């Protein structure tokens, strides 16, 4: 047992790979949040008047809100005045006022394995790289443009496609939605904007890479994806942050609009800095992600691998408004050391013959707390709704916790809703079997955990799946017993 | 805090002496603390997670009468209550409205040392015995439990000394019989000492056409190696609101089995909270709810695995017709160190109409790793192919539906150990599905 505990510890103690800090000259505004801050951000981004109004409205509403307490999380008080709400790593070029990428910044992304030069992008994925508050570079833009696809930073989209942004922004996640949605709407700085026109199948995987670099800043990005009729897009999101002793706040909003017969696949590998083994530092990841399947026969699929962040609080959701629309949620959430996660999904069935699937795999190790919280709501008119939910939790060690809080609100008698959940540890038998066949305990645990998460990992695009698999074993290293 | 509580706070303040004057010192000694706690929180609102789908404060809004002066009801419980269980040998006691009633005719001789009777009387005659138990669990209960402690004046006590087996079922019949809107506060205290054994049948009846609201707090102590079955059957009226809280403390190697059946009611909230405090304890809590009209049935369960090597199982089923609402929230809380826990929870629900609502919330909170815990919950309808199969073989559609519903409900009833009660419930449930419940011959209650 002791030996196994050591292996557990070893797995748990594997260092965070992306914890370096890049020395990049960054334009950071003073910390603090006021109407002035909101105006300043809007001004820095050279936004039209309606955008400023949109932000101010949200800011004023945010002032009336209190931080919600219902999650199964222990969140130390956050001083919103101590955070800087805008950090820009791009330096201004005096001549043409265009921003130029710092070579140091290029190096950073290379170090992270994100090639910003298109010639290097052999993987064929178009990337929008966001550092701190600003989108650094978006690759393959021209090629996508030929097909009519818009893939740009949010800031650019507000300038170049204001009509589209105005039509859709805030229609899926209203600023009144919750505390962090209001905060994000007030101060969001950048993010990705995707528009897939009618009948177009996006030829590349689109990807956004988020990086927090500057100290004492929060990242508040906003992503808006619109898949018009009969279109398809697969979108990936990855993120890392340097190791710092203080906690950093990341409060993002992702809005997805899926029109008739369209399909969106959204995959996340979340690897924000989780804090050290004593629970010091780490990113607070409070995110509102929601997709609206507006059209008939539309489909939205969320896949997430959550291994980072000191505290994760997010529920990627689907509003199944169109008839025959489908929502899927596949999640692996791994917590270690003092990490806390309260994550899950909401499936809101509104249209007829809607279907949703939830597969959630939680893995807790160290002294972490891992909760699944999910809602399945079948409204009165959602005839023949079908839901299947499965939430499994795996406990590694006796100091951690695994919790399941599903909610089912059913208002239609033709609905079939199923939920099942199990919690257990890796059985001695499984380990013994592997040992017997010459597989070391640590390796065996890696194998078993990967097998356990396979159902979800299989849903990830290939390159991501490999990365996620590695990430799982790394995050777990030293955690098993 | 907002809403109706202010009225009750004032009522309590003004009538404190009247309440106290009719009661034993032990009951009175707990009121102040409960009052302070109630004042601090008030009635739960929909913002309280545990009351999200059960708006209880509204139920307290009606101008109820409370029998604080303990006027005796002018009824003989034994003559108005006929819905007994055939072939069931039982010791029967009554709570009429919220007073223990001395109805004669059904008491048999109890084993030596067993105490069964009025809470108020026994609190006066055996204060040292009850001191250890009364309000020990309810003191940390929710605000409705505090409300009950503030106002409770009577109820039933069952005490079974060590190594004693009470063979015959103890039937506690609660009747609501009044001509005005009534608010009743009842209290039951069950103490089983080491290696003792008992079966309790709680029957909740009301014929009330006027609105009534009853709070019921049941505190249960199951000693080491003791075994207790509690069957709780509600057959009240649509005008009745029931807020029942059962708090159970189990010692090592004890066994507790609970089955809560809601056949007819108005607005019901049953909370049961079981604390497994000794190794080897085993608990099984089950429930069946059949709702139609605008019935509201809420079952809230919590099983606390505080120590290692305990087992728990849960099975709750709902059949919801017309505009009824079902709420189920069940939590299994496995505390640190509660290794080798085996815990299983199942919740299955049938919605029969488009107006029926079901809110299900099975929960696991687990802080120990060597456990086997699972829960499953489903909401659906009767199996179309099964219905078709039966019709094909000449069973009319309606009959086929009844048969399937009956089978669905049967799984819960099977957990009942008392054969005559099981048979009786099968009949009651079948009648309930046919809409024939309330037609028992000669029963004044059912009319």
Image (tube, coloured by chain):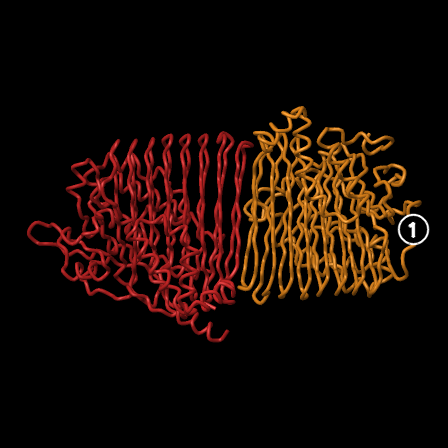
Chain colours: A red, B orange
Q: Nearer the viewer, residue A198 or A90?
A: A198
Q: Nearer the viewer, residue A130 or B332?
A: B332
- Residue plotted at (33% across, 58% down): A271
Q: Is residue A34 left or right of residue A380?
A: left
- Residue plotted at (44% across, 74% down): A6
Q: Is residue B445 above or below residue B163?
A: above
Subunit that carries the residue with mark 1? B
Count of marks placed on residues: 1
Q: Is residue A110 left or right of residue A36?
A: left
Q: Position of residue A12 (x, y in %)?
A: 40, 68
Residues packed near mark 1 inside 10 Å, few (<14), some (14 to 19) or many (20 plus): few
Q: Position of residue A240 (x, y in %)?
A: 30, 59
Q: Position of residue B188 (x, y in %)?
A: 77, 52
Secondary-structure class at tag 1: loop
Q: Is residue B53 left or right of residue A318?
A: right
Q: Is residue A156 above or below residue A11?
A: above
Q: Nearer the viewer, residue A403 or B236?
A: A403
Residue with the mark numbered 1: B108
Q: Nearer the viewer, residue A245 or A266?
A: A266
Toward the left, the furthest residue is A95
Toward the bottom, the furthest residue is A2
Toward the front, the furthest residue is A437
Answer with the quarter of the image where residue A161 lies: top left
Q: Position of residue B19 (x, y in %)?
A: 79, 51
Q: Is residue B210 above or below residue B117?
A: above
Q: Is residue A286 left or right of residue B145?
A: left
């Amino acid at each position: 047992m002791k030996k196994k505990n050591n292996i557990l510890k070893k797995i748990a103690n594997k260092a965070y790979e992306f914890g370096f800090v890049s020395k990049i000259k960054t334009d950071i505004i003073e910390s603090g949040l006021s109407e002035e801050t909101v105006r300043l951000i809007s001004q820095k981004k050279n936004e039209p008047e309606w955008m400023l109004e949109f932000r101010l409205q949200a800011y004023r509403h945010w002032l009336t809100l209190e931080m919600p307490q219902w999650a199964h999380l222990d969140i130390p008080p956050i001083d919103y005045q101590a955070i800087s709400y805008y950090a820009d790593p791009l330096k201004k070029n005096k001549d043409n006022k265009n921003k130029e990428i710092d070579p140091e910044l290029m190096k950073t992304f290379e170090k992270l394995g994100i090639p910003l030069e298109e010639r290097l992008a052999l993987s064929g994925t178009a990337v929008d790289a966001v550092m701190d508050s600003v989108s650094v570079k978006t690759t393959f833009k021209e090629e996508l443009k030929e097909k009519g696809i818009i893939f740009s930073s949010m800031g650019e989209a507000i300038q170049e496609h204001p009509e589209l942004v105005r039509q859709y922004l805030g229609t899926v996640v209203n600023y009144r939605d919750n505390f962090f949605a209001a905060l994000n709407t007030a101060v969001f700085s950048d993010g990705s904007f995707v528009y897939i026109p009618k009948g177009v199948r996006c030829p590349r995987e689109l990807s956004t890479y988020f990086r927090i670099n500057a100290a004492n800043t929060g990242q508040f990005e906003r992503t808006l994806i619109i898949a018009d009729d009969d279109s398809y897009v697969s979108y990936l999101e990855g993120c890392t942050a340097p190791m710092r002793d203080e906690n950093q706040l990341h409060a993002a909003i992702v809005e997805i609009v899926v029109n008739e017969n369209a399909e969106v696949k959204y995959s996340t590998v979340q690897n924000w800095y989780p804090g050290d083994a004593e629970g010091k530092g780490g990113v607070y990841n409070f995110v509102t992600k929601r997709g609206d399947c507006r059209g008939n026969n539309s489909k939205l699929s969320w896949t997430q691998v959550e291994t980072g962040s000191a505290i994760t609080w997010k529920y990627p959701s689907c509003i199944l408004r169109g008839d025959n629309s489908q929502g899927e949620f596949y999640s692996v959430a791994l917590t270690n050391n003092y990490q806390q996660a309260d994550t899950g999904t909401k499936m809101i069935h509104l249209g007829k013959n809607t279907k949703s699937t939830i597969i959630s795999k939680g893995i807790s190790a160290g002294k972490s707390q891992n909760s699944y919280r999910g809602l399945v709501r079948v409204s009165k008119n959602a005839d023949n709704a079908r839901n299947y939910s499965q939430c499994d939790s795996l406990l590694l060690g006796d100091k951690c916790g695994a919790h399941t809080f599903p909610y089912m609100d059913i208002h239609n008698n033709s609905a079939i809703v199923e939920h099942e959940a199990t919690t257990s540890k890796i059985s001695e038998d499984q380990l013994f079997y592997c040992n017997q066949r010459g597989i070391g305990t640590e390796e065996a645990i890696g194998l078993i955990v990967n097998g356990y998460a396979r159902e979800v990992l299989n849903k990830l695009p290939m390159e991501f799946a490999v990365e996620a698999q590695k990430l799982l074993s790394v995050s777990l290293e030293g955690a098993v017993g | 805090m907002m809403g109706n509580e202010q009225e009750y706070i004032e009522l309590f303040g003004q009538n404190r002496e009247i309440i106290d004057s009719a009661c034993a010192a032990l009951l009175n000694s707990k009121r102040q603390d409960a009052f302070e706690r109630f004042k601090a929180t008030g009635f739960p609102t929909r913002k309280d997670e545990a009351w999200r789908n059960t708006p209880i404060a509204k139920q307290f809004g009606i101008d109820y009468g409370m029998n604080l002066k303990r006027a005796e009801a002018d009824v003989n419980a034994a003559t108005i209550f006929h819905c007994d269980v055939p072939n069931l040998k039982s010791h029967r006691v009554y709570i009429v409205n919220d007073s223990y009633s001395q109805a004669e005719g059904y008491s048999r001789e109890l084993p030596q040392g067993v105490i069964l009777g009025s809470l108020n009387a026994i609190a006066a005659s055996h204060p040292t015995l009850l001191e250890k138990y009364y309000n020990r669990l309810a003191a940390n209960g929710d605000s409705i439990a505090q409300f009950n402690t503030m106002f409770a004046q009577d109820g039933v006590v069952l005490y079974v000394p060590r190594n004693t087996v009470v063979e015959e079922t103890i039937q506690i019949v609660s009747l609501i019989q009044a001509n005005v809107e009534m608010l009743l506060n009842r209290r039951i205290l069950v103490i089983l000492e080491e290696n003792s054994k008992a079966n309790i049948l709680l029957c909740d009846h009301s014929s009330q056409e006027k609105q009534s609201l009853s709070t019921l707090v049941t505190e249960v102590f199951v000693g080491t190696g003791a075994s207790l079955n509690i069957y709780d059957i509600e057959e009240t009226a649509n005008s009745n609101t029931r807020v029942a809280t059962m708090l159970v403390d189990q010692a090592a190697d004890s066994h507790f089995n609970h089955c809560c059946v809601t056949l007819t009611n108005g607005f019901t909230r049953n909370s049961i909270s079981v604390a497994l405090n000794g190794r080897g304890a085993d608990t099984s809590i089950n429930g069946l709810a059949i709702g139609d009209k605008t019935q509201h049935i809420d079952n809230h369960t919590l099983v606390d695995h505080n120590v290692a090597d305990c087992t728990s199982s849960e099975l709750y089923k709902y059949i919801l017709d017309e505009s009824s609402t079902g709420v189920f929230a069940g939590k299994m809380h496995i505390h640190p160190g509660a290794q080798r826990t085996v815990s299983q929870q199942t919740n299955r629900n049938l919605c029969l109409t488009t107006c029926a609502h079901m809110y299900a919330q099975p929960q696991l909170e687990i802080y120990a790793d060597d456990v086997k815990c699972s829960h499953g919950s489903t909401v659906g309808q009767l199996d179309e192919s099964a219905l078709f199969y039966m019709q094909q073989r000449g069973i009319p559609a309606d009959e086929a539906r009844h048969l399937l519903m009956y089978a669905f409900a049967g799984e819960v009833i099977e957990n009942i150990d008392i054969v005559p009660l099981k048979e009786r419930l099968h009949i009651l449930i079948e009648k309930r599905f046919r809409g024939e419940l309330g037609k028992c011959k000669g029963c004044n209650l059912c009319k």
